[in-house]
Amino acid sequence: MQSFMGLSPGMWEAKLQNCVEAKNGAPLPHDFYAQIDHISTLRLEADLAEIPFARQAINKVATLRCVASSTPSTRLRWKLRHVGLIDLFDPHIFSADLVANGKPAPDLFLHAATAMNALPHECVVIEDSVNGVIAESGRHACHRLYRWQPLLGRSW
């Protein structure tokens, strides 16, 4: 499961398709991704919540800050609005839809750094996915990387 986290949607779908075909010898149903999107939306609407003390922690960052996520732009902005954190980052919200290669390529981090008028070695990344760690560390896209590990038992 960890190997799928942080991938851009197109890369996630291709990887899943390959895994399923290798295991079952047949492709996924044609409406599989539409079903997943519908179920995910229902679950997000019901369960997505701010991580306790996230606002306070983010407010302590006394410099430029942004979000650089593999989540598609529309859903990313919706998530940030839904948990009440969009005001802490807007307009500095970057999605993999803005670059040719999503994570694990470093393109998104490099795009965000450029858009923020920062040199990559001046940036700090707090990353929650294995593919994001690969994206950052594989080409040293940014100066420091902190791996954030969600608490065990969290559904997100």
Image: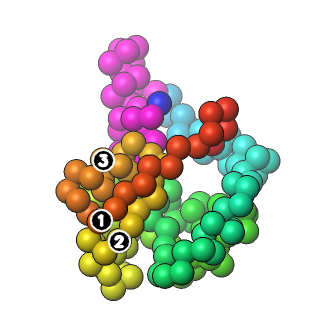
Callouts 2 and 1 close, C-beta under 8 Å: yes
Quadrant for the C terminus, please. Answer: top right
* Amino acid type of the residue tagged 3 in the rendering: Ile
Residue ID for mark 3: 134
Query: Mark 2 or mark 3, which is nearer to you?
Result: 2
Residue ID for mark 1: 142
Residue lying at 37% horizontally and 57% vertically, measured from the top left: 145
Magenta residues (range) = 2-28
- How many residues crowd around disc 2 within 10 Å: few (fewer than 14), some, or many (20 or more)? some
Residue 64: which numbered mark, if any? none
Using the image as rendered, state which of residue 153 and residue 41 is in the foreground.
Answer: 153
Residue 24 x %, y %: 40, 14
Residue ID for mark 2: 123
Marks 3 and 1, how far apart in space? 12 Å
Residue lying at 39% horizontally and 42% vertically, measured from the top left: 130
The residue sitting at the left extreme is 139
* Amino acid type of the residue tagged 2 in the rendering: Cys
Q: In this view, does 24 lie above or below 52?
A: above
